[in-house]
Amino acid sequence: MQAGEFRADLYYRINVVCIQLPPLRERREDIPAMATHFLERFNRENSRNTQFSPAAMRLLTSCYWPGNVRELENCVERTATMAQDGVISELAFPCNANRCLTQVLHHVDREDAVRPLRLTDIPIREVPMAAPAPEAATTLPTAAPVADTPALVDDGKPEGEHERLIWAMERCGWVQAKAARLLKISPRQMGYALQKNGIEVRKF
């Protein structure tokens, strides 16, 4: 439209609803149902009866997934193909042997790629069906203030929301999930704060 190559009136006719879909790592409550669907499809197509162990589902739910749904689908299919028995354990995934391409290609530390102990609030059952997660708060918690008001002098962080966000992202190598933990907020809150302050995430 800005280049004069598309009619503005036509654009406004067809642009009715715009859906912003967050990355998979910011809606982890969807992962168990998706992983189960992909595994059931694999079983039907290959006459198998493979299942995830609860620990394996917790590992899938805690992964970083920069490739989003396609990466999850391929991971499930690859692991199910190589499974030796009917139950896929957490040890069957390549990340446990440092063979995960996600960690190599996206410079994700193991702490960021797999954090099962940090997800004890996500219920995992034998037939995993994730309950809808409560809507994330749009305000930043007071435990780690990221606000426009001056911060405490002795907390070691810069004053002002914009400065704190830049400080956290630079310290964490511009890994958004890691910076969110540093500021003690959720990844979704971090994404909202970056967008609100007009901070573009750097790609390496």
Image: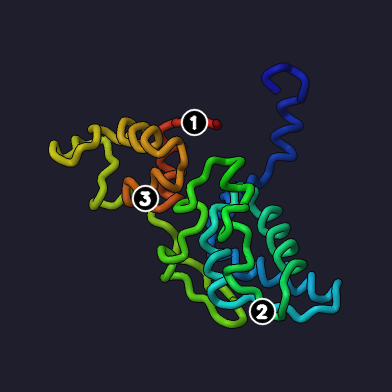
> Front-most of 96 and 173?
96
Which residue is at a point 55% across and 31% down the rendered structure image?
204
Q: Mark 2 points at which residue?
A: 87
- Residue type, label 1: Glu
Q: Residue furthest front?
A: 97
Where's residue 51, x and y in %?
Answer: 68, 78
Q: Which amino acid does label 2 sit on?
A: Val
- Residue 183 in the image: x percent, y percent? 32, 46
Count of residue discs: 3
Give, as a three-letter code, the residue at label 3. Arg
Which comes sooner in the sequence, label 1 or label 3? 3
Report the Cα–Cα distance between label 1 and label 3.
Answer: 19 Å
Q: Is residue 168 left or right of residue 130?
A: left
The residue at 45%/48% (across/down) is 177
**Number of residues whose C-alpha sits closer than 10 Å to that of mark 3, classed few (under 14), some (14–19) or many (20 or more):** some
Q: Quadrant of residue 104?
A: top right
Q: Distance between the residues labelled 2 and 3?
A: 33 Å
Secondary structure of residue under mark 3: helix
Q: How crowded is mark 2: few (under 14 residues within 10 Å), some or many (20 or more)?
A: some
Local secondary structure at mark 2 = strand
Question: Horizontally, is 39 left or right of 179 in the view?
Answer: right
Q: Which mark is residue 200?
A: 1
Residue contact between numbered discs 2 and 3, judged by CB atoms under 8 Å = no
- Residue 33 is labelled as none
**Foreground pick, 195 / 157:** 157
Give the crowd class for mark 1: few <14, some 14-19, many >=20 residues within 10 Å.
Answer: few
| Quadrant in the picture for the N terminus | top right
Q: Relative to residue 51, is residue 158 depicted above or below?
A: above
User: In the structure shown, which secondary structural element does the residue marked by tag 1 occupy?
Assistant: loop
Residue indicated by mark 3: 181
Residue 58 against residue 140 in the figure, above or below? below
